[in-house]
Image: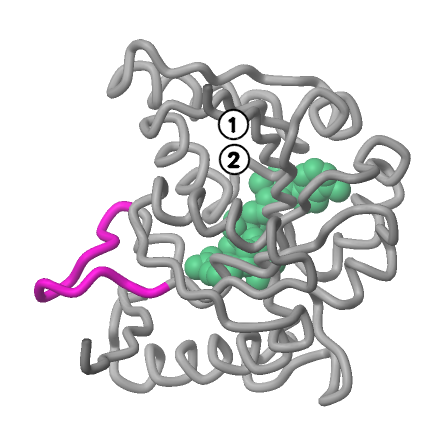
């Protein structure tokens, strides 16, 4: 049986893409966020496309995280500490997926500097959970179009717990992307910079926020 996943900030750009694709893949998805009416609209949309989707709105992030096996805070880096303090007591031993990119206001730099990352900062805030980086190098629109020109976008997965990395890799695959285990959690520093660069490229070349990374390789 598929695991239960809590998506916090589910009505946002990333949260709705993740929720939609994971619900379609058969996961039980518990959705939480600030705005209940936006969550209701998302639920209606998902149910109209996938009538048997197992998606439930949960009033608070802590309750959703308590009930879930895996937690995805689909929120900004700036909101990370507040959400972490809410869920801290109920995520012991659980996987928490970091998809945040700690962008500055002008989208041309990271708030974290070179010696840490949003994912590592989340791990410090949640020392008893297994934080894994994933999904930060794809755009929200990619969830609707995870394949372009015959290539499925890669999603880099990084974490210090190998089992957690392989579990998240399965989730990435089920969400429609190609998972690539990229190393320890500290690799998030690179992954977050990769998205910073992709955002710059997207703005410069008008990719319309539909772009991603693909590692081409021989065999
Ligand atoms: N957008 C992308 O293409 C993309 C790509 C890769 C990674 N990311 C990363 O994904 C994360 C989310 O980005 P996004 O573009 O999806 O942002 P977004 O559209 O603004 O969504 C964020 C969601 O989080 C909710 N939220 C904010 N604070 C919360 C709290 N304390 N508790 C519960 N819910 C809360 C917001 O609700 P309200 O709006 O109602 O306040 C909103 O629904 C960011 O860290 C970003 O760096 C984004």
Q: Residue at x 64, y 50 (%)?
A: 75
| Residue sitting at the far left | 149
Magenta-colored stretch includes residue 204: no
Mark 1, ligand 1, within 8 Å: the answer is: yes
Magenta-colored stretch includes residue 148: yes
Dots 1 and 2: beta carbons under 8 Å?
Answer: yes
Image location of residue 3, percent across then percent down: 53, 26
Query: Of 31 and 23, which appears nearest the observer?
Result: 23
Picture disc at residue 11: 2
Q: Secondary structure at mark 2?
A: loop
Range of magenta residues: 144-154
Q: Residue at x 35, y 84 (%)?
A: 201
Image location of residue 60, percent across then percent down: 75, 23
Mark 2, ligand 1, within 8 Å: the answer is: yes
| Alpha-carbon span between mark 1 and mark 2 | 6 Å
Query: Of 39 and 193, which appears nearest the observer?
Result: 193
Side of 195 relative to 128 (left or right): left
Q: How is the image coloured?
A: one colour
Image location of residue 122, percent across then percent down: 77, 59
> Local crowd at mark 2 within 10 Å, few (<14), some, or many (≥20)?
many
């Amino acid at each position: 049986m598929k695991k239960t996943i809590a998506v916090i900030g589910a009505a946002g750009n990333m949260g709705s893409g993740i929720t939609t694709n994971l619900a379609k893949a058969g996961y039980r998805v518990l959705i939480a966020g600030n705005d209940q009416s936006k969550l209701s609209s998302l639920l209606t949309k998902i149910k109209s496309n996938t009538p048997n989707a197992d998606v439930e709105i949960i009033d608070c992030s802590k309750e959703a995280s308590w009930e879930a096996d895996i937690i995805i805070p689909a929120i900004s880096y700036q909101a990370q500490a507040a959400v972490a303090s809410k869920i801290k007591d109920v995520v012991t031993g659980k996987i928490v997926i970091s998809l945040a990119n700690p962008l500055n206001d002008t989208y041309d730099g990271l708030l974290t500097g070179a010696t840490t990352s949003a994912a590592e900062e989340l791990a410090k805030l949640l020392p008893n959970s297994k934080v894994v980086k994933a999904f930060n190098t794809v755009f929200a629109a990619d969830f609707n179009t995870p394949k372009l020109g015959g290539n499925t976008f890669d999603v880099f997965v990084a974490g210090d717990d190998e089992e957690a990395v392989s579990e998240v890799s399965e989730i990435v695959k089920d969400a429609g992307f190609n998972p690539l285990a990229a190393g320890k959690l500290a690799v998030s520093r690179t992954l977050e910079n990769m998205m910073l660069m992709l955002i710059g490229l997207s703005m410069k070349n008008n990719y319309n926020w539909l772009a991603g990374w693909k590692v081409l390789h021989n065999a």
